Image: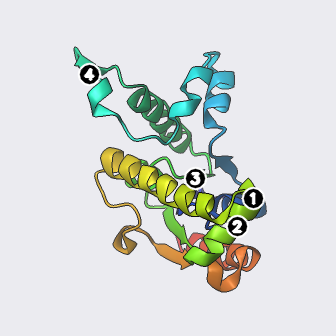
């Protein structure tokens, strides 16, 4: 794409947000920054961040961390800031990408070309999707949805200092249950292309 495109996509667990992000990034021809980001950073910078993977998109545990001379001992905070710096570097370099979660809406808020999206879904559809994709019972899927969304909310609200899922914070909030995942991708692609054309 001739113009820089920056997309931040936040999602409820089970809404199909990651599937939507993968397909959308391919159709738009932009890089996808997601849970593989630490591997990518490790490869580009020659530093092994594999031990930090378990802290990806995890809220800070204030009881188990402290700051010494302004440097945090929190692995959650260290992991978050490594990713935030990487996202910022890519944006400053003029690259186009779609970032999944990781406070992209906050980290990139000063870029006029940023498009922020939040994917939600009906609870019944989210439960069925998690049961199928994760091979869980209904009770396990329900618990997983509540647990993951709570973690995402705490993570986002701590690092971004704003409310995760608040419709006023996003350009577009869409329920993927209404159109289905593939048609949601089509709708978002049209919206993004029109936004790019009018920049």
Residue drawn 49% across the image and 61% down it: 113
How many numbered circles are shown? 4
Circles 1 and 3: CB atoms closer than 8 Å? no
Which of label 1 and label 3 is nearer to you? 1
Q: Calculate the distance from the C-alpha at mark 1 to the C-alpha at mark 2.
A: 6 Å
167 on left or right of 143? left
Q: Which residue is mark 1?
A: 133
Mark 1 or mark 3, which has the lower sequence index? 3
Circles 4 and 1: CB atoms closer than 8 Å? no
How crowded pointer 2 is (Cα within 10 Å; few <14, some 14-19, many 20+) is rated as some
Considering every residue shown, the one lying at the far bottom of the view is 178
Please state, as top left, top right, bottom left or bottom right, where the N terminus lies in the image: bottom right
- Front residue (pair 110, 105): 105
Mark 3 or mark 2, which has the lower sequence index? 3
183 on left or right of 173? right
Mark 4 or mark 1, which has the lower sequence index? 4
Q: Which residue is mark 4?
A: 66
Q: Element at badge 4?
A: loop
Instruction: Decide: is 65 above or below 174.
Output: above
Q: Which residue is mark 3?
A: 100
Residue drawn 54% across the image and 26% down it: 52
Q: Which residue is mark 2?
A: 129
Circles 4 and 2: CB atoms closer than 8 Å? no
Can the viewer see residue 171 in this picture?
yes
Snapshot quadrant of residue 18: bottom right
């Amino acid at each position: 794409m001739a113009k820089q495109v920056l997309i931040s996509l936040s999602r409820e667990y089970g809404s199909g947000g990651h599937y939507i992000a993968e397909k959308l990034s391919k159709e738009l021809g932009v890089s996808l920054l997601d849970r593989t980001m630490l591997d990518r950073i490790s490869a580009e910078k020659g530093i092994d961040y594999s031990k930090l993977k378990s802290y990806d998109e995890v809220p800070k545990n204030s009881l188990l961390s402290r700051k010494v001379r302004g440097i945090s001992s929190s692995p959650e905070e260290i992991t978050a800031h490594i990713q935030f710096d990487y996202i910022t570097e890519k944006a400053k370099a003029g690259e186009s990408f779609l970032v999944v979660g990781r406070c992209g809406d906050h980290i990139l808020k000063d870029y006029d070309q940023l498009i922020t999206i939040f994917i939600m879904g009906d609870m019944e559809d989210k439960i069925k999707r998690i049961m199928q994709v994760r091979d869980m019972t209904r009770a396990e899927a329900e618990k997983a949805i509540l647990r993951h969304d709570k973690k995402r909310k705490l993570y986002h609200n701590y690092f971004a200092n704003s409310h995760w899922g608040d419709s006023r914070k996003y350009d577009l909030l869409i329920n993927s249950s209404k159109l289905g995942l593939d048609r949601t991708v089509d709708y978002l692609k049209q919206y993004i292309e029109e936004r790019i054309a009018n920049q």
